[in-house]
Amino acid sequence: MADMNGDGQPDVAVSNYADSTVSVLLGNGDGTLQAQHTFDTGDGPGKVETADVDGDGTPDLITPNYIQGTVSVLLGNGDGTFAPQRSFDAGATPYSLASDNSVAVLLGTGDGRFEPPQIFAGGTGCYSVAFAEVNGDGLMDLLTANFRDNNVSVLLGHGNGTFAEARTVAAGKGAGDVAVADVDGDGRLDLLTADFTDNTVSVLLGRGDGTFAAQQSAPSPAPDMRLYSVSAADLNGDG
């Protein structure tokens, strides 16, 4: 989620694996969304991420492409539309920039292009990644959701594009996606995981030093549907 058209409201981007596209749904600011607009990606896109990769102040879209083994970058125009994709090589069968037991990190050159990938060990079934500063040193850290290990790996950043050896914290069974947000308002970032097997969302409250409290689980709001992904955003403007 990000403000993709500059109106101050969060918008939503969703990858469509079978169609090899990304759908962008602009937010109305009241918890509802407009009709989708689609943009082409590489074959078999996984989880879509947003970031300003070319330094122009507008969000861009990044998708790992499972079938092609590439990453697509779609530069944002600032109005909710995006330029045609650029593709960069990644690890084999990436899904959310992760490939089973490893994570591919592509350092940006500042103009929407990237250097060749560096590979770091995650957990078993490393399906999803997130970047956030979780230990208070001002450096970006790397987190992976590990589907087969039922946990999250925390790799503290060194500030030069490399990361410390992974430490793990338990999540629910089938933890397939991870998101980062301050969910209890204490100024420290917390973790949320979508637990496919348990069909729950796990909340791991952060201590601000790169460690996290034991998981708390909440049932899926749709019991008949399995949870594949989790995101956190203020969709209704209540802070």
Image: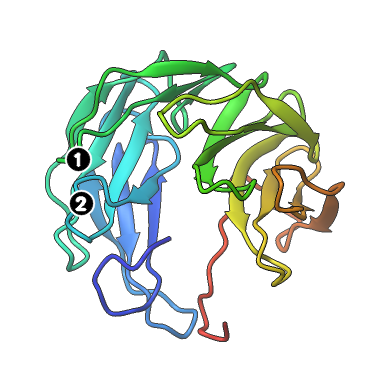
Does residue 12 appear anywhere in the picture?
yes
Q: Single out the residue that lies furthest toward the front.
A: 137
Residue type marked 2: Gly
Please name the residue that numbered disc 2 is placed on. 55
Left-right relation of 164 to 43: right
Marks 2/1: CA–CA distance: 6 Å
Crowd around label 2: few <14 · some 14–19 · many ≥20 (10 Å) = few
- Relative height, residue 39 to residue 119 (above, below): below
Residue type marked 1: Gly
Crowd around label 1: few <14 · some 14–19 · many ≥20 (10 Å) = few
Q: Quadrant of residue 33?
A: bottom left
Q: Which of 145 and 109 lies nearest the eye of the viewer?
A: 109
- Relative height, residue 138 to residue 220 (above, below): above
Please name the residue that numbered disc 1 is placed on. 110
Does residue 230 appear anywhere in the picture?
no
Q: Position of residue 140 (x, y in %)?
A: 49, 42
Sequence order check: which comes first, mark 2 or mark 1? 2
Please report the residue visible at 51 percent of the width from the left and 30 percent of the height from the top: 158
Q: Position of residue 121 (x, y in %)?
A: 58, 16
